[in-house]
């Protein structure tokens, strides 16, 4: 009887930790989205390092939504265990710190366009100018500052 209680307690704690972890990770995307929204209303530029709620030293902008697995690992130079997105509308930024995977930020290309495509930026060089487009007025264009 005690073994069953211990096992049920352990499984309950593990389940709770998984739920907390999932919500914590999902919050990163919401925080980044909110920070982008705030920056676009108050400035004509943003620093990627200021809108991310975690530490990183390199960000890889992956334009091809179908890259994942070993192909993605080769691009970022480490094993990330990320699957391809399976949809044409999703793009991603893979954040790395000290050659370790940190976060996979996914966004819709109809909402945000980062340029140039297939970009890699260091944390020290991550200023993007905010551009508006007449062709796609609802799409935010973020262009790497030189």
Image (tube, grey):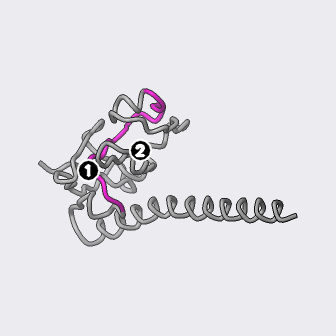
Q: Position of residue 70 (x, y in %)?
A: 45, 27
Work out which quarter of the rendered image holds the N terminus and state it: bottom right
Return the mark for residue 57.
1
Q: Disc 2 or 1, which lies upstream in sequence?
A: 1
Q: Nearer the viewer, residue 140 or 87?
A: 87
Q: Residues within 10 Å of mark 2 (few under 14, many from 20)?
A: many
In the displayed structure, would residue 12 be above or below residue 109?
Answer: below
Q: Label 2 belongs to which residue?
A: 92
Residue found 66% across the figure and 59% down from its top: 14
Exactly how many numbered labels are in the figure?
Answer: 2
The range drawn in magenta is 54-70
Is residue 19 shown left or right of residue 144? right
Element at label 1: loop
Residue found 11% across the figure and 48% down from its top: 146
In the displayed structure, would residue 86 be above or below residue 146?
Answer: above
Q: Position of residue 45 (x, y in %)?
A: 21, 61
Is residue 2 shown left or right of residue 34? right
Q: Position of residue 44 (x, y in %)?
A: 21, 64
């Amino acid at each position: 009887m005690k073994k069953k209680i211990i096992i049920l307690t352990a499984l309950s704690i593990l389940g709770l930790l998984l739920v907390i972890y999932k919500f914590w990770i999902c919050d990163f995307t919401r925080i980044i989205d909110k920070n982008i929204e705030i920056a676009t209303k108050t400035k004509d530029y943003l620093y990627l390092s200021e809108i991310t709620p975690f530490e990183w030293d390199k960000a890889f902008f992956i334009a091809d939504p179908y890259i994942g697995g070993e192909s993605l690992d080769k691009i970022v130079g480490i094993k990330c265990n990320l699957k391809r997105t399976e949809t044409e509308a999703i793009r991603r930024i893979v954040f790395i710190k000290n050659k370790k995977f940190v976060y996979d930020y996914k966004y819709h290309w109809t909402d945000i366009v980062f340029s140039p495509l297939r970009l890699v930026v260091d944390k020290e060089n991550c200023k993007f100018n905010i551009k508006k487009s007449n062709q796609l007025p609802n799409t935010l264009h973020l262009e790497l500052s030189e």
